[in-house]
Image (tube, coloured by chain):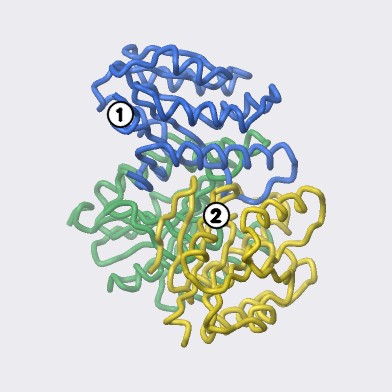
Chain colours: A green, B yellow, C blue
Amino acid sequence: MISSETGSVLVLGGARSGKSTFAEALVTASGLAMHYVATGRAWDGEMTSRIAEHRDRRGGEWQTLEEPLALVDGLKSIDTPDRVILVDCLTLWVTNLMMEERDMAAEFAQLAGHMLTARAKLIFVSNEVGLGIVPDNRMARDFRDHAGRLHQIVAAKAAEVYFIAAGLPLKMKG
Amino acid sequence: MISSETGSVLVLGGARSGKSTFAEALVTASGLAMHYVATGRAWDGEMTSRIAEHRDRRGGEWQTLEEPLALVDGLKSIDTPDRVILVDCLTLWVTNLMMEERDMAAEFAQLAGHMLTARAKLIFVSNEVGLGIVPDNRMARDFRDHAGRLHQIVAAKAAEVYFIAAGLPLKMKG
Amino acid sequence: MISSETGSVLVLGGARSGKSTFAEALVTASGLAMHYVATGRAWDGEMTSRIAEHRDRRGGEWQTLEEPLALVDGLKSIDTPDRVILVDCLTLWVTNLMMEERDMAAEFAQLAGHMLTARAKLIFVSNEVGLGIVPDNRMARDFRDHAGRLHQIVAAKAAEVYFIAAGLPLKMKG
């Protein structure tokens, strides 16, 4: 079973757009063994409570893997065709990579390469962050550049791409 | 006449996207008695001139009600099936509720409840604010979280949802 | 040959959404002589490298014209039906006009007027900047108001309008 059959999905949306809920519904509907790859780190109380809220909503049937940096290694470690893996979210992964001063292009290429051969069904959630005013500080501009490039790369390899607003999906590909 | 017949509408869009103009065209086309519920407060000269600009565009056939906080009470006071009510906009209502430290979830639930039984046709305008970089300050983050949650709630109850960009509508529901 | 036949196009999208790449593909597919009107000024190293990156991607078959302010004069100087002109981007033009304290409404009306009679095929690229939190400072708010108004004006005259996210086009008009 190759990627063109299993079909990776990118779910893109704004803050509190309902993108995680939509992605979780895709996972549940797949009938496959459900895995959750969390890229977020609990930096502070705010992030801790967001992570807990997501965990509570998903319930106990999910297997959770925390991979703030080694996302592709994490995906490879559970890459079997009976699994669906929800990655939530790509923008937090970008943040973590930037903080560690990783080679972004190399990391993105590695993910794109994995998407081509993945046997598990992959569902990526990410925040669209490029539709506001240009940020004042360079790091924020770099962040949205990296996020935008990654979204293009993942969307190009994905079988389906959705843009979510107000909890409603708009199918952009597939 | 119940909500499923009259059909509430959510018109979502960015700043200067043409969302109010689009919503006003829906109101005019309805043939119903036209009511405008303004949630904005004239804090400063900039807001005063925005309000005046909207008022001038609408013309004299509209009845205007100012409800910065008691939105649902205002809607109930004119809830008859011969009326169309344009609420402009939900994000300003969220701002006002936050400033008064109201229970946001309770307020949103009250609006959702009213949408289920409303006899007037309701058209809500709101700003999508969640598609830029994560704001530095906590209040701005809370604001966009509240706005995002409210959009999901209203969209779920609405018969039609439009996303407006460059003055053009994209139908997301209905 | 009039505008309704040649058909102007507006390509709107966020930062690093792939909008320039999409617009360049439209240009190449047209089979017309390819012209690039750059509105950006190389203020700093960051902007210089962005401009160079765009230039390298386009290759040597393009004629380039730099018009940070006199956009319409530039368009008129090469307005023949055998040409396709890519304007990248409208938001930088807005920035330059604001810095020179030009009459924005008059400038926008002049562009709209030219679109009605243009003989060359015009393809405009622009950044959607109105979908984030309201900016703190007045100049940024004015900027997104001007950009939003210009997008509405150009979209109304364009034959086709696309919204780009993650490199994928969503047709909003045409």
The quarter of the picture where the C terminus of chain B appears is bottom left
> Which residue is rendered at x = 58% and y = 19% of the image?
C69
Q: Chain of mark 2?
A: B
Q: In the image, what residue type sits under mark 2?
A: Thr
> Which residue is rendered at x = 56% and y = 67% of the image?
B124
Q: In the image, what residue type sits under mark 1?
A: Thr
- On residue B21, which mark appears? 2
Kindly identify which residue carries mark 1: C6
How packed mark 1 is, by other alpha carbons closer than 10 Å (few <14, some 14-19, many 20 or more), is some
Q: At numbered mark 1, what does the secondary structure look like: helix, strand or loop?
A: helix
Q: Nearer the viewer, residue C1 or C31?
A: C1
Q: Is residue A100 visible?
A: no
Query: Would residue A110 be found to the left or right of residue B59 on screen?
Result: left
The lab-note entry on whether marks 2 and 1 share a chain reads no
Q: Position of residue C121 (x, y in %)?
A: 34, 25
Residue B160, picture quadrant: bottom left
Q: Position of residue B135 (x, y in %)?
A: 67, 50
Q: Position of residue A11 (x, y in %)?
A: 40, 57
Q: At numbered mark 2, what does the secondary structure look like: helix, strand or loop?
A: helix
> Which residue is rendered at x = 44% and y = 16% of the image?
C76
> Which residue is rendered at x = 49% and y = 48% of the image?
B167
Residue B96, picture quadrant: bottom right
Q: Position of residue C155 (x, y in %)?
A: 45, 40
